[in-house]
Image (cartoon, helix red, strand yellow):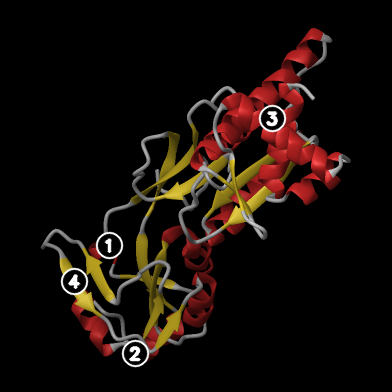
């Protein structure tokens, strides 16, 4: 088995996190897969996996090698296609991650359009309300909200979003509309913990910054639950503008305290260094940039 074949085996083991599962995918015996990885590690002079009786996990070196290997294998496929006179159409598996509601509302439509354009590509849509490690988790593209700390990624900014305070018209009619953040102490609060980890809400205005300690009557660990509760008139909540933009448009929620909102947070599409020329990834990024920049619920 040559190095290129060994690299293909390596990718399968990394994705399956199992030698046995990879052997089934590749239609090889488990010992053959084990020998292939051992030879590859010996040739490289590094350990690619940490192995236990229950788990197979990439080492830090293995995670970096996985990113490079995927690019190499796809470049080889494209080179073969060009040599044969055929168009190197994007294909393979594309892994995309985004925050849950942003992914469901604004990224999934982009994925659907992309899959119609490039039917040879299979997409893994991984939506989490946490920052995924692109390298360690074998991801291709991530949509990030907030200021980027990782200098090892390429980033394309598509706009921004911000935290907004809102409630249903029925709630505001019954309890009144607060005119200042300090008045939130007199209201029922729905706390969305993924948007505001702390019960101290911070506001900004021309008059200066203000920190308000709120006492929630309802705690929600999922943003969708907080939105639903606010629609039902259970209180005032603070969410991201993209999460409730449609609710503002249809009147189910109203925006309050607009003069005290914090500064917008950037929305960026990021991918690892060295992948910028990958046809599969580049074609998705190009489409996502165009669609998200045209999205009415992303600030520009």
Q: Is the residue marked by circle 2 packed among few (<14), some (14-19), or many (20+) residues within 10 Å? A: few
- For disc 2, the marked residue is 175
Element on which disc 1 rests: loop
Image coords of residue 167 (percent x, y): 41, 77
- For disc 4, the marked residue is 211
Q: Looking at the image, which residue is at 69% across and 30% down?
A: 39
- For disc 3, the marked residue is 39
**Residue 151 circle label:** none
Q: CA distance from mark 1 to mark 3?
A: 58 Å
Q: CA distance from mark 3 to mark 4?
A: 59 Å
Q: CA distance from mark 4 to mark 1?
A: 12 Å
Image coords of residue 201 (percent x, y): 26, 72
Q: Is the residue marked by circle 1 packed among few (<14), some (14-19), or many (20+) residues within 10 Å? A: some
- For disc 1, the marked residue is 261
Q: Looking at the image, which residue is at 34% across and 44% down?
A: 149
Q: Earlier in the sequence, mark 3 or mark 4?
A: 3
**Contact check, label 1 and label 2, Cβ < 8 Å:** no
Q: Nearer the viewer, mark 3 or mark 2?
A: 3
Image coords of residue 134 (percent x, y): 52, 44
The N terminus is located in which quarter? top right
Q: How many numbered circles are shown?
A: 4
Q: Earlier in the sequence, mark 2 or mark 4?
A: 2
Element on which disc 2 rests: helix
């Amino acid at each position: 088995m040559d190095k290129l074949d060994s690299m293909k085996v390596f990718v399968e083991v990394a994705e399956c996190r199992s030698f046995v599962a990879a052997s089934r995918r590749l239609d090889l015996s488990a010992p053959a897969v084990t020998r292939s990885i051992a030879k590859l590690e010996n040739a490289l002079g590094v350990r690619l996996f940490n192995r236990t009786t229950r788990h197979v996990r990439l080492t830090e070196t293995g995670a970096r090698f996985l990113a490079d290997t995927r690019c190499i294998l796809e470049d080889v496929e494209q080179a073969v296609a060009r040599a044969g006179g055929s168009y190197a159409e994007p294909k393979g598996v594309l892994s995309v991650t985004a925050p849950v509601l942003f992914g469901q509302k604004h990224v999934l439509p982009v994925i659907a359009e992309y899959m119609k354009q490039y039917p040879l590509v299979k997409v893994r849509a991984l939506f989490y309300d946490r920052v995924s490690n692109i390298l360690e988790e074998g991801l291709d593209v991530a949509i990030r909200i907030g200021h980027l700390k990782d200098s090892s990624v390429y980033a394309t900014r598509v706009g921004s979003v911000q935290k907004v305070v809102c409630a249903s018209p029925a709630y505001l009619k019954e309890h009144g509309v607060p005119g200042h953040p300090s008045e939130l102490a007199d209201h029922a609060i729905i706390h969305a913990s993924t948007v505001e980890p702390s019960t101290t809400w911070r506001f900004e205005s021309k008059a200066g910054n203000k920190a308000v300690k709120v006492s929630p009557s309802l705690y929600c660990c999922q943003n969708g639950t907080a939105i639903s509760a606010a629609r039902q008139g259970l209180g005032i909540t603070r969410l991201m503008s993209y999460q409730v933009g449609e609710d503002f448009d249809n009147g189910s929620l109203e925006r309050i305290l607009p003069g005290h909102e914090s500064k917008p947070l950037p929305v960026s599409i990021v991918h690892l260094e060295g992948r910028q020329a990958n046809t599969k990834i580049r074609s998705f990024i190009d489409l996502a940039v165009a669609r998200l920049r045209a999205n009415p619920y992303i600030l520009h």
